[in-house]
Amino acid sequence: MDINRGNRLLRLSSFASKSRGLHKYIVEHPKGGKEHPNARVHFKQGDVVTTQIQCANGETILLTHDTSLQRPYNLGFRVQGTEGLWQDFGWGEKNQGFIYFEKQMNHTHRWDNTEKWLDEYDHPLWKNYAEDAKDSGHGGMDFFVMNSFIECIKRNIEFPLDVYDLATWYAITPLSEKSVKNNGAVVEIPDFTKGAWKTRKPVFGFDGAF
């Protein structure tokens, strides 16, 4: 989406559910119980926090913070555009997602399994290094992040993520808290690049970095 490089996050609005999951966990845990000191803690964070972010180029990002309730691990990735969408429902397995392309699937409105699509169209890095990456964390993503960092240092080239990206994404938490506290009020997201996002170029070209 070229965030901070031709696009930027403009504003957000956040809502939180009631807080029940952490208290329930403490009370029901074998080492916890109703008399445990933490059972008297009032957790302010809702079990599920939903944040919608508006981008300068017209996209929206929906973030869900859901770490207090029991469920199978699922990052909940979803990418949707004018002619199709992809959703990931699993953890580290290609065949646990769903995909739909309107034209290729003749307007059937039926999901297709992602496995054959990823086998054919997956990024060369994943095709070449999936086996090496699989146990590195987060379904293999950590492998590529760490290796990109190392290769940038070795080659003295620009990092794909920099301090402006760090500031932008870290700001989401306190800004979301502010929005939740004010009943979902829209909160502006600072432009940490001070306008440079309009002319900064996206960082690509990591196909041969390994």
Image (spheres, helix red, strand yellow):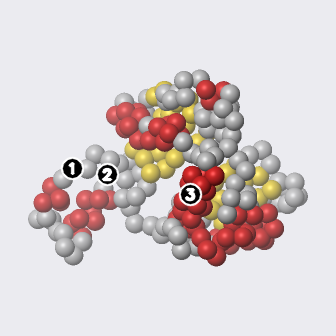
**Residue 89 is drawn in which quadrant?**
bottom right
**Residue 86 is drawn in which quadrant?**
bottom right
- Which dot, 3 or 1, sits closer to the camera? 3
Q: Return the x and y of residue 183 as percentages of the image width and height.
A: 39, 32
SS type, badge 3: helix
- Which dot, 2 or 3, sits closer to the camera? 3
In this view, the residue in front, 133 or 70, is: 133
Q: Tell me the quarter of the image containing the C terminus.
A: bottom right
Q: Which residue is mark 3?
A: 150
Q: Return the x and y of residue 179 as percentages of the image width and height.
A: 41, 33
Seen at 79% across and 63% down, the residue is 121
Tell me if residue 18 can be seen. no
In this view, the residue in front, 149 or 192, is: 149
User: In the rendered structure, which disc, 3 or 1, sits on the residue that comes first in sequence?
Assistant: 1
Seen at 62% across and 29% down, the residue is 197
Q: In the figure, 193 relative to 112: above or below?
A: above
Seen at 80% across and 48% down, the residue is 83
Residue lying furthest top in this view? Answer: 195
User: In the rendered structure, which disc, 1 or 2, sits on the residue that comes first in sequence?
Assistant: 2
The local crowd at label 3, few if under 14, some if 14 to 19, many if 20 or more residues have their Cα within 10 Å, is some
Report, in whole angstroms, how far the alpha carbon at label 3 lies from the one at label 1: 43 Å
Residue type highlighted by circle 2: Ser
Q: Which residue is mark 2?
A: 19
Left or right placement of residue 93 versus residue 103 in this view: left
In this view, the residue in front, 97 or 18, is: 97
Q: Which residue is mark 1?
A: 42
User: In the rendered structure, which disc, 2 or 3, sits on the residue that comes first in sequence?
Assistant: 2
